[in-house]
Image (cartoon, grey):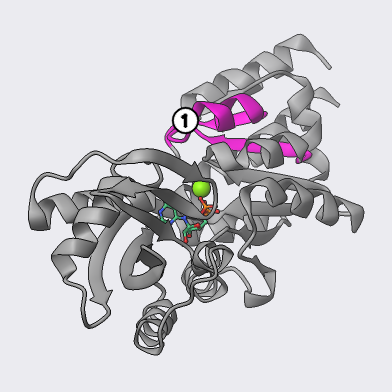
């Protein structure tokens, strides 16, 4: 490789908002044929809004918002921020939780006003042998069909509410997916969120329903990358979260959203400074072209 060609390539990269970790990264861009995209914060804006609260009969919306909001206030997850902001807007200040724990890919737990509270996936409730009553199950199904994320709230051993949050896809995502396809890459959506929400996002972004891998726990994202590599694919991965770091490191080419967490940026080979997915396509095209000059 001629140093000059590499410098031209990386200099142009910096102009486009692409930071390249080192010259050896360019080589990986040549063979990648599959691109795995994290959903939340990568294909979607990651800025969620609390849209609705469904409760069981003997529970008020204000109680749910107080207990769930208090816990979520301590978490940095985009869903948690939506719940905390929505709760604060509706009921004012929130109490401080005790024994707070963040359960990656599942939700949060802690003590609020003396109640043992869980907020998160239905699976988290199942781990404590709780299930949603019929009314809440119905609300959850409806929300998910509409492409929203439904979060369960339980305390003192009973499921009490379902919260609906939604996260819009980035305006630029459909075009980014088209550009990636034009480079010969197969886009795959990877998420810890449920299948219905993931498929709704995929449809909007232009990813095939058959290329949606949903309900994957954070620690298992890296296994998905290994499995795809085991099928003979050369895999690029784009992600933003702490949850994505191991998968980014495992991928043949890791692209981190510059708007994401430090862990993701450290694990990636390339950083997309502005968090614009279209730049992922630019980055791959630019690197391939730079290599072309070198050869
Ligand atoms: P993604 O893979 O899309 O970036 P995560 O792995 O971070 O998503 O989370 C997966 C799922 O776990 C979320 O869709 C949500 O249902 C649940 N979850 C995770 N953290 C929280 C939280 N703090 N509050 C409520 N639900 C949560
Ligand atoms: Mg994410």
| Residue 93: quarter of image | top left
In the image, residue 88 above or below residue 168: above
Residue at 36% over, 60% down? 167
Residue at 62% over, 76% down? 209
Residue occupied by mark 1? 273
Does the image show residue 46? no
Residue 34 covered by magenta stretch: no
In the image, residue 149 above or below residue 146: above
> Is disc 1 placed on a helix, strand or loop?
loop
Q: Which residues are magenta?
A: 251-274
Q: Quadrant of the C terminus?
A: top right
Q: Nearer the viewer, residue 81 or 240?
A: 81
Does the image show residue 216? yes
| Residue 156: quarter of image | bottom left
Residue at 71% over, 51% down? 220
Horizontal placement of 148 versus 253: left or right? Answer: left
Q: Nearer the viewer, residue 53 or 212?
A: 53
In the image, residue 95 above or below residue 23: below
Q: How many marks?
A: 1
| Residue 242: quarter of image | top right
Residue 271 covered by magenta stretch: yes
Q: x, y (%) of residue 273? A: 47, 30
Label 1 residue near ligand 2, CB within 8 Å: no
Horizontal placement of 136 versus 198: left or right? Answer: left
Q: x, y (%) of residue 95? A: 19, 43
In the image, residue 199 above or below residue 264: below
Residue at 37% over, 65% down? 154
Q: Quadrant of the N terminus?
A: top right
Q: x, y (%) of residue 240? A: 52, 40
Horizontal placement of 104 versus 270: left or right? Answer: left
């Amino acid at each position: 490789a001629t140093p000059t060609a590499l410098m031209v390539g990386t200099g142009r990269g910096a102009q486009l908002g692409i930071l390249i970790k080192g010259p050896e990264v360019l080589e990986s861009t040549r063979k990648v044929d599959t691109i795995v995209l994290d959903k939340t914060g990568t294909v979607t804006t990651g800025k969620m809004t609390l849209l609705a609260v469904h409760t069981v009969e003997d529970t008020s919306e204000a109680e749910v918002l107080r207990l769930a909001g208090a816990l979520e206030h301590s978490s940095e997850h985009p869903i948690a921020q939506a719940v905390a902001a929505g709760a604060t807007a509706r009921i004012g200040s929130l109490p401080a939780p005790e024994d707070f724990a963040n359960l990656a890919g599942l939700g949060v737990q802690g003590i609020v006003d003396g109640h043992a509270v869980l907020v998160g996936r239905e699976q988290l409730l199942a781990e404590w042998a709780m299930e949603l009553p019929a009314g809440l199950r119905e609300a959850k199904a409806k929300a998910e069909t509409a492409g929203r994320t439904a979060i369960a709230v339980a305390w003192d051993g009973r499921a009490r509410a379902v919260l609906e949050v939604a996260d819009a896809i980035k305006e630029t995502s459909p075009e980014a997916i088209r550009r990636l396809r034009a480079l010969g890459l197969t886009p795959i959506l990877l998420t810890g969120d449920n299948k219905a929400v993931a498929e709704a996002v995929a449809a909007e972004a232009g990813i095939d329903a058959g290329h949606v891998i949903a309900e994957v726990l954070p620690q298992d994202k890296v296994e998905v990358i290994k499995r795809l590599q085991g099928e003979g694919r050369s895999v690029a991965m784009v992600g933003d979260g702490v949850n994505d770091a191991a998968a980014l490191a495992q991928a043949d080419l890791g692209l981190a959203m510059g708007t994401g967490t430090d862990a993701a940026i450290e694990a990636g080979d390339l950083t997309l400074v502005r968090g614009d997915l279209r730049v992922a396509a630019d980055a791959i095209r630019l690197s391939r072209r730079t290599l072309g000059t070198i050869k």
